[in-house]
Image (cartoon, rainbow, N blue to C red):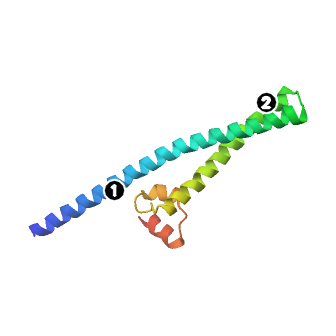
Amino acid sequence: MQDLDEQEKARRRKEEIEFRNKKRYSNLFLFFGSIFQIAISLLIILGLWLLFAFIFFKVIGAQNQYVFQGFTIIIFIGGLMLGFTIYKKLAQYIIEKKNLKEKLTNDVIKHYAKLTKEEQEKLYRR
């Protein structure tokens, strides 16, 4: 009877350590992913803005500041959306390429990874 209790304690301890490791890896993945997303979004916005400014001032030769300001807002929003899209696709690729499904929590996997129907059912049952 006492062996059974010790085995149960060891099993629970192992599960707790595994859960903490998954949580740690997930937090690190999200932290560095967020930093990457901010950086890539800023680079995209800067690149689009420079391209538009070159086209607007050098090629077209326009001088209307209100049109330029309006397009700057559109470029900012478009750059953010493009950055989000690139980040999500890259996160999916990294999770699949590095086989991180076993190392990340279910919430992170549900959000980023491409899952088959069986994998989705398995994750949502937990």
Secondary structure category for the residue under label 2 = helix
Image label count: 2
How crowded is the residue under tag 2: few (<14 C-alpha within 10 Å), some, or many (20+)?
Answer: few
Res. 100 image quadrant: bottom left
How crowded is the residue under tag 1: few (<14 C-alpha within 10 Å), some, or many (20+)?
Answer: some
Circle 2: residue type: Gln
* Residue 39 x, y percent position in the rendering: 58, 40
* Residue 108 x, y percent position in the rendering: 47, 55
According to the image, label 2 marks what residue?
Answer: 69
* Residue 62 x, y percent position in the rendering: 89, 30
Res. 43 image quadrant: top right
Left or right position of 57 against 31 = right
Q: Earlier in the sequence, mark 1 or mark 2?
A: 1
3D distance between C-alphas at marks 1 and 2: 49 Å
According to the image, label 1 marks what residue?
Answer: 19
x 63%, y 42%: residue: 41
Secondary structure category for the residue under label 1 = helix
Q: Is residue 109 above or below residue 68?
A: below
Q: Quadrant of the N terminus?
A: bottom left
Q: Is residue 14 above or below residue 41?
A: below
x 31%, y 58%: residue: 18
* Residue 60 x, y percent position in the rendering: 90, 35
x 19%, y 65%: residue: 8
Left or right position of 88 against 104 = right
Q: Quadrant of the C terminus?
A: bottom left
Left or right position of 12 against 26 = left
Taking the view exactly as shown, the residue that stands out farthest to the left is 2
| Most foreground residue, 60 or 30 | 60
Circle 1: residue type: Phe
